[in-house]
Amino acid sequence: MSKSTLTEEENALLLKAVGGVDGARSLIYGSKHVVDRRQIFTNVVVGGVAYRSRPGMLQYLEDKGFVRDAPTKEILASKGYTPSTRRFDLKLTEVTPNDLNLPNGAFLSDIITAAKSHGLTLCPQDTAAAIMTQMQGDWTSKSRLTVVSPPIMFNGAPWLFSVSTKRMKAEPGDYGHHWGPLDRFLFRHV
């Protein structure tokens, strides 16, 4: 068996996975975006009237029990964390590397590149805090989601935030980390 061609069985499975011949052509010629249907938060507001002072926002998140660990508190209070001053109404989409045709997982830079090819972009840095303060009753995912934003530089290292139904947590945003094919990310849908 040649490593450069598919067997008939593999070809049939591939066609089935992408929605038949029409689905394959849509992927090849760019008219099909695999992740367009995965919006999970459609009305998150950052900035503008949703803007809270850094100490006020941090206190709110602590009072609600959403922020519990010292690194997350320190990063939210740091100069590297930049809340939006302009209002944005965000539509957020959940994706995995597998959804982005990265079946073996990928580095964050590759995940971002693949997401951009599907019409997704980075979230503002304060998206995770906005989700925790505004969307608690609207979760459609039971998984931890990493919010992909420009990294927050803290103590010389890049950081991102992850959110779950009960917690917001700082996560290393190192571009050298290889993420698994089923890790879940939130991107802004443009």
Image (spheres, rainbow, N blue to C red):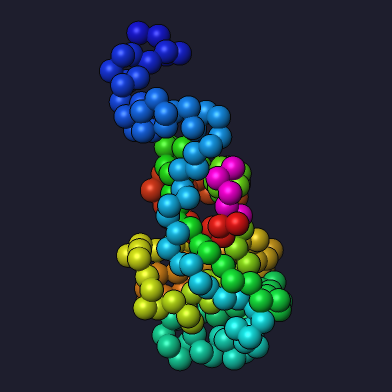
Which segment did they paint magenta?
117-121
- In the figure, 76 relative to 149: above or below? below
Figure quadrant of residue 135:
bottom left
Query: Left or right of 179: which side holds 58?
Result: right
On whether residue 120 falls in the magenta region, the answer is yes
- In the figure, 156 relative to 19: above or below? below
**Quadrant location of the C terminus?**
bottom right
Residue placed furthest toward the top: 1
Residue at left offset 63%, top offset 72%: 88
Q: Position of residue 91 (x, y in %)?
A: 53, 64
Residue at left offset 41%, top offset 85%: 65
In this rendering, does residue 90 appear at all? Answer: yes
Q: Give the camera-side residue of 4 and 74.
A: 4
Q: How many marks?
A: 0
Figure quadrant of residue 15:
top left
Residue at left offset 71%, top offset 76%: 86
Q: Position of residue 159 (x, y in %)?
A: 59, 64
Residue at left offset 51%, top offset 89%: 60
Q: Position of residue 80 (x, y in %)?
A: 69, 72
On whether residue 5 falls in the magenta region, the answer is no
**Quadrant location of the N terminus?**
top left
Q: Give the camera-side residue of 7 and 160.
A: 7
- In the figure, 122 relative to 167: above or below? above
Q: Position of residue 164 (x, y in %)?
A: 40, 70
In this rendering, does residue 14 appear at all? Answer: no
